[in-house]
Amino acid sequence: MVKRPFIVGNWKMNLTLKEGVEFARQLKNNLGARRDVICGICPPFVFLKDVCLALEGSGALVGAQNVHSDKGGAYTGEVSASMIKEVGCSHVIVGHSERRHLLGETDSFINAKVKAVLATGLKPIFCIGEKLNEREEGRTEYVVKNQFKDGLRGINAQHVREVVIAYEPVWAIGTGKTALPSQANEVHSFIRELLTAEYGKDLAKGMYILYGGSVKPENAKELMAQPEIDGLLVGGASIKFESFWDIVKAASTPCNNN
Ligand code: PEP
């Protein structure tokens, strides 16, 4: 199976509603009838519905940046998976490093979120990645393996195929330091081995593993040329339509080995 490049923008807490909708319109216009690339954006919660409406019929996906693990109840300020689905989203980022490290999200909470997202029929974009000191201490594989195992605990093969994994080394997020394409590929290959061991080769091969961490138009093509990189999760460079679209174009040119 040839995988289409999968490029997702994470706007984080940026843009105005007007700018977000204008971005979505531009994305729809530029995508036109193209279906050779899977392309999407993850706006802040309050923009989701408008962005979904602006992208209707475009083939682009819309994802939330976070979700609560419970179905509903007394969780002031939180949003459930079914609420996210109701406004038209298909995906949810879970376990982003900013939530793990700035907001103290634990692996078990992240696991509960992944399960809630899957139970609602949405697809998690499940983020894992090591911090700088962990890489320097030679613990990258140990950290990635634990996050993988804990985050996907109890998820069977039927459900795991809906998960999109994003390898995001924390030291490369928003820092301008991209992992070398070969460094990223090495970890992607390790994650693919973990998937193979847990769920079998065929399933592992079909699953998407995205790279995220200071992706720019200048490095997108080289990253996507790595055999184990199936797509890109883009933060800072997804805020301006032009740079996001340049990444989409660079990532979907034929040198892609997938
Ligand atoms: C991210 O937030 O997922 C991300 C990869 O950010 P940046 O591209 O800005 O490093």
Image (spheres, rainbow, N blue to C red):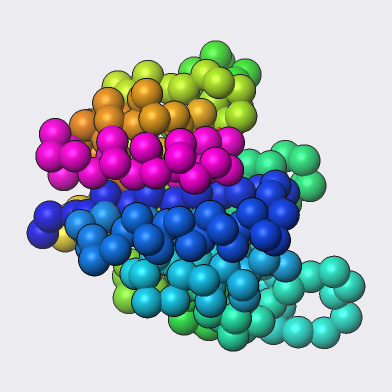
Q: Which residues are magenta?
A: 233-258
97 w.r.t. 33: above or below: above
Q: Quadrant of the N terminus?
A: bottom left
Residue beneath the point at 61% across and 57% down = 20
Q: Is residue 29 visible?
A: yes
148 or 180: nearer the viewer? 180
Q: Is residue 169 visible?
A: no
Q: Number of numbered discs present?
A: 0
- Place of residue 230 in the rendered image (x, y in percent of width and height, measured from the top left): 28, 46
Q: Residue at x 51, y 61 (%)?
A: 24
* Position above or below: 51 against 1: below
Q: Is residue 112 above or below residue 121?
A: above
Establish if 198 lies above or below 230: below
- Asked if residue 184 lies left or right of residue 76, the reply is left
> Hey, which residue is sitting farthest top in the picture?
136
Give the quarter of the figure containing the C terminus.
top left
- Residue under the point 52% across and 71% down: 54
Name which quarter of the figure residue 210 lies in.
Answer: top left
**Image location (x, y in percent) of residue 91:** 49, 67
Residue 43: x percent and y percent? 61, 58
- Asked if the magenta segment contains residue 238, the reply would be yes
Q: What x and y, as percent, mark residue 121? A: 46, 81
Residue plotted at (62% across, 75% down) = 49
Task: Check residue 2 for magenta coloring.
Answer: no
